[in-house]
Image: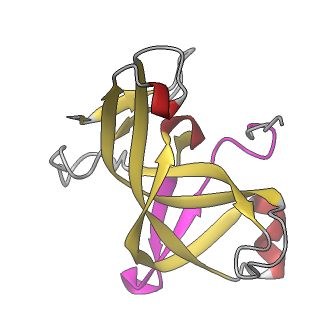
Amino acid sequence: MEQWGKVRRLDGGDTMLAAGLISHQRDSRDATFVRYETLVDKHAHQCNLPPTYEKQTFYGRLHHIFVVHIPFTLALKVDGPTTIFLTALSTCKLKPTPSSLSSLDIHFYSNLNDALDIVDIVCLQCLVGRMPIDGGRQWAIIDRSGNLARAVFED
């Protein structure tokens, strides 16, 4: 397994940095906060129901990028040797958005979750900006991609 410090979306996309490997300069922008989208089971807490997946959008800080090389193994049911790219992120604990700002796609948070989410790297969508508010006790997330730049999941 390898660790990488940064990754770039194809076709001129954003370069996202892993906070765990890249030192942050105080006079530069923080390119570790991202928007990511995953499929979440609506019935995860009801084990008697079959899973029903829906797309959810999350904002968080990218901590690690892992590259896992898997050799050909019949037990894993893969066609041959394969490489998997995973990311570890701490999710922003979003606060309710005031109705006056809901059309602007601005979200607010003050803390990150302690536990890390491990997701496939294709879930990463883009960098997001942050702006301190309320004397630095809260942050506003500025998602410059808008509602048109969202992932499409297929069965």
Q: Which residue is drawn at 18% across and 45% down?
A: 21
Q: Which residue is drawn at 82% across and 34% down?
A: 154
Image location (x, y in percent) of residue 135: 39, 85
Using the rendered view, name the quadrant where residue 45 is placed.
Answer: bottom right
Q: How many marks?
A: 0
Using the rendered view, name the quadrant where residue 116 is placed.
Answer: bottom left
Question: Does residue 142 appear left or right of residue 76 in this picture?
Answer: right
26 falls in the magenta region = no
Q: Is residue 36 above or below residue 104?
A: above
Q: Looking at the figure, which quarter contains the C terminus?
A: top right
Question: Does residue 97 appear left or right of residue 133 in this picture?
Answer: right
Question: Does residue 12 appear left or right of residue 103 in this picture?
Answer: left
State the residue in front, 152 or 132: 152
State the residue in front, 34 or 78: 78
142 falls in the magenta region = yes
Query: How is the model colour-coded?
Result: secondary structure
State the residue in front, 22 or 131: 22
Image location (x, y in percent) of residue 83: 40, 24
Question: Does residue 51 appear left or right of residue 96 in this picture?
Answer: right
Q: The magenta stretch spans which residues?
A: 129-149
Q: In this view, does 131 lie above or below 73?
A: below
Image location (x, y in percent) of residue 26: 19, 55
Q: In this view, does 4 lie above or below 55?
A: above
